């Protein structure tokens, strides 16, 4: 016996990936529905070897459905997620709306799966920000061993994190550089993204940080440990898919780089590719379509007593969004609902 599953926002990048991953991982599904806004109504999407026709989110009745994976923005989530939750359908939300709600668990299954039991307060589970998700997967096993005091992270985030419009803008601007007649001014991003990097993701806050940077701080504390100090600089780069992060970690206890490498090799969800030779590391283009969070360039930081540097790369449409949501659904099914 399987689950009745709804994918909300099924025509977007993340929604389509959710359907792909549910099929790839043979998630136990009895019934599945693909929902979209009225402007996308009737669009066909793939689920394994099946083709689904999208239904109208506005009129859909969530009664009798076990879980709904939401891949829409905060405004639509605010309107429809409580309706689904009230109908007894557990919402797994990819937007930022519920991430900081103390009554809603924020889950990365490799890191804090036990916290999923808190879903019953609102019948909602939050999926973290894409840049946070891959980082905490790498940090958690090291934190368990040597206790992390402080994290300094610089991100190199692909345009797919800004949705289809971001990908289209990079594509169109890149083409326009070779054909100056067709100039494409910035629209989705604050400055030209083609052949450039932009040190702003989301809006600026009063302290000079951006909201994306604030998210990494707040979410790491909620998922892992409120005592960890985090400072982040988040940068958009002209890459279509795949986020990369340069992470500097300061521990309470000494951790040798060799031990750190072995700990990460044994950790769930991590793939270590760390050869000290030209090309002996993973880049964003290498990780596209993969489930793993890749870690490379593991090395001691000699400028502090207990420091490690590492390079972390993941497919942001997968681990940063769709895969993590499906893993939450799997955890919910295995630990709570137990139908599959």
Image (tube, rainbow, N blue to C red):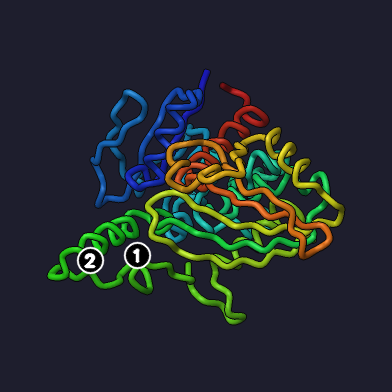
Q: Position of residue 326 (x, y in %)?
A: 52, 36
The one of 149 and 330 positioned closer to us in this rendering: 149
The one of 86 and 118 positioned closer to us in this rendering: 118
User: Circle 1 — which element?
Assistant: loop
Residue 51 shows up from this direction: yes
Q: Position of residue 11 (x, y in %)?
A: 32, 44
Q: Residue at 58%, 63% (x, y): give it.
A: 154
Q: Residue at 31%, 50% (x, y): give it.
A: 37
The one of 84 and 322 positioned closer to us in this rendering: 322
User: Circle 2 — which element?
Assistant: helix
Q: Residue furthest top?
A: 1
Query: Which residue is labeled 2 in the image?
Result: 177
Total number of numbered labels? 2
Q: Position of residue 267 (x, y in %)?
A: 69, 36
The numbered mark at residue 195 is: 1
Is 235 left, or right, of 219 in this rendering?
left
């Amino acid at each position: 016996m399987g689950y009745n599953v709804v994918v909300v926002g099924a025509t977007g990048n993340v929604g389509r990936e959710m359907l792909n991953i549910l099929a790839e991982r043979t998630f136990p599904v009895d019934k599945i529905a693909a929902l979209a806004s009225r402007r996308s109504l009737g669009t066909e999407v793939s689920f394994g070897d099946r083709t689904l026709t999208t239904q109208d989110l506005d009129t859909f009745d969530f009664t009798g459905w076990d879980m709904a994976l939401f891949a829409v923005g905060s405004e639509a989530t605010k309107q429809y997620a409580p309706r689904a939750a009230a109908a007894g359908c557990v919402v797994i939300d990819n937007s930022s709306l519920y991430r900081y709600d103390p009554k809603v668990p924020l889950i990365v299954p490799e890191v804090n799966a036990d916290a999923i039991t808190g879903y019953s307060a609102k019948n909602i589970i939050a999926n973290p920000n894409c840049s946070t998700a891959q980082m905490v997967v790498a940090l958690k096993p090291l934190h368990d061993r040597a206790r992390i005091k402080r994290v300094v992270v610089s991100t190199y985030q692909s345009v797919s994190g800004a949705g289809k419009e971001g990908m289209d803008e990079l594509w169109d601007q890149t083409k326009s550089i070779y054909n100056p007649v067709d100039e494409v001014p910035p629209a989705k991003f604050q400055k030209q993204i083609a052949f450039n990097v932009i040190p702003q993701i989301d809006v600026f806050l009063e302290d000079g940080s951006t909201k994306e940077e604030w998210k990494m701080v707040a979410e790491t504390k909620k998922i892992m440990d409120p005592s960890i100090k985090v400072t982040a600089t988040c940068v958009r780069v002209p890459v279509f898919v795949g986020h990369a992060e340069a992470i500097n970690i300061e521990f309470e206890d000494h951790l040798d780089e060799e031990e750190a490498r072995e700990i990460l090799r044994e950790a769930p969800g991590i793939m270590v590719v760390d050869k000290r030779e030209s090309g002996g590391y993973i880049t964003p283009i290498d990780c596209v379509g993969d489930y793993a969070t890749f870690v490379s360039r593991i090395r001691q930081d000699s400028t502090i007593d207990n420091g490690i540097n590492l390079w972390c790369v993941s497919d942001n449409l997968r681990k940063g969004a769709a895969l993590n949501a499906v893993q939450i659904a799997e955890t919910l099914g295995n630990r709570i609902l137990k139908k599959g």
